[in-house]
Amino acid sequence: MAKIIIFTEQNQYFYVYIFIALLKLKNMKEISLVELENRFQEKVDAEVRIEPNDWMPEEYRRTLIRQISQHAHSEVVGMLPEGNWITRAPNLRRKAVLLAKVQDEAGHGLYLYSAVETLGADRESTIDDLHSGKAKYSSIFNYPTPTWADMGAIGWLVDGAAIMNQVPLCRCSYGPYARAMVRVCKEESFHQRQGFEIITVLAQGTPEQKAMAQDALNRFWWPALMMFGPNDDESKHSKQSMKWKIKRLSNDDLRQQFVDVTVPQAELIGLTIPDPDLKWNKETGHYEFGAINWDEFWQVVEGNGPCNHDRIKARREAKENGMWVREAALAHAEKRAARKTA
Ligand code: FAQ
């Protein structure tokens, strides 16, 4: 039976008391949230890893889901430009190596999707976000690979840039992401060397082969610099991500490290970096480089790059065409479970 509360002189003190108690409870809740956040930051500052069952701010969780799922999508979409050359590799050794490399990228995607799941996100819906265009993936994979030299340029420059960015991520505050990165970086360093070997062989080959290597460098150099993301003052997530030690180095610092390491490699194999403003600065101990075309970067990120449409179409079709395998596996698992309970 519903009880009607009548506010009388006799019970008014009781309700005032309840009201004050509720206010206190609300305050306590706020204090404890601030306290939880402070304790979390102290842990991060003391380099204690955050694990899936630990308390974490909701925004920290969301930032990790965003970054790790975008990273996973990049690995998987990143199989496509090189996958384009598996059937046309120039010899058996090159074919076997390229096949292994592309399979490694699939593996990286799988570790990363698993890391996303530890944060409570649903793997399939993050993949659907990629297919619907809601989720981003690295801009670099929207450029075409018309020649074999592009396999060299991708390994050398794209995997080279990926390592530069991912080695600091091995010290990310979130345990599952940091641990996945350790294995990923070991494999990426093999990828970088196989790419550098391809490009070196071409650069030392016939004039046509050298021209092919130079052309690949010309096309991939600037997009590789864009991989590190917008300049620090335009990077909306960097400040908070660095405070939480998700990111350990800024976009610009990593880009500079990449330029400093890569320019001497190009010189060593007799190729020219396509940047007339590139020069060594003795005082800073770094290379100065020309202006990046950020307009092009944002166009590609927003879906208007040369291959965005084809890349997403290929991923969508892969899911649709593989659906019967999932359905068959599920039906088989259900049948087995039913047999066990019977
Ligand atoms: N492409 O505030 P920030 C690989 C977006 S793996 C597209 O600076 P943040 C292996 C960014 O998401 C390559 N979008 O963002 C391989 C954000 O948009 P949102 C992938 C980009 O997260 C090799 C907005 O711009 N690696 O190559 C890009 O703090 C060969 C504002 O930017 C990773 O994902 C971009 N390049 O810093 C595979 C590493 N840059 O989300 C196959 C992990 C920025 O607000 C073959 N990720 N954006 O809508 C990271 O380290 C970071 O997420 C950054 C961006 C550094 C990429």
Image (cartoon, rainbow, N blue to C red):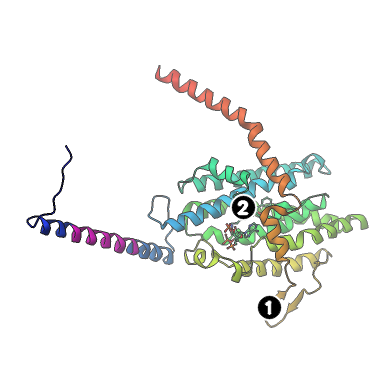
Q: To which quarter of the image does residue 274 belong? A: bottom right
Q: Is mark 2 within 8 Å of ligand 1?
A: yes
Magenta-highlighted residues: 19-34
Residue 46 vs residue 88: left or right? Answer: left
- Tell whether position 30 is magenta: yes
Q: Position of residue 224 (x, y in %)?
A: 71, 60
Going 41% across and 58% down the picture, which residue do you hit?
57
Residue that protrudes farthest toward the top in the picture: 342
Q: Position of residue 95 (x, y in %)?
A: 77, 42
Is 272 situated above or below 131?
A: below
Going 50% across and 57% down the picture, which residue do you hit?
63
Q: Amino acid at mark 2?
A: Lys
Q: Position of residue 290 (x, y in %)?
A: 75, 72
Q: Nearer the viewer, residue 117 or 204?
A: 117
Q: To which quarter of the image does residue 49 belong? A: bottom left
- Tell whether position 187 is magenta: no
Is 321 situated above or below 182?
A: above
Q: Quadrant of the N terminus?
A: top left
Secondary structure under badge 2? loop
Going 52% across and 68% down the picture, which residue do you hit?
239
Residue 136 visible in image? yes
The residue under label 2 is: 136
Residue 80 visible in image? no
Q: To which quarter of the image does residue 139 belong? A: bottom right
Q: Residues within 10 Å of mark 1 (few under 14, many from 20)?
A: few
Residue 62 vs residue 167: left or right? Answer: left
Q: Residues within 10 Å of mark 2 (few under 14, many from 20)?
A: some
Q: Position of residue 287 (x, y in %)?
A: 72, 74
The residue under label 1 is: 285
Is 225 situated above or below 337?
A: below
Secondary structure under badge 1? loop
Ligand 1: give its quadrant. bottom right
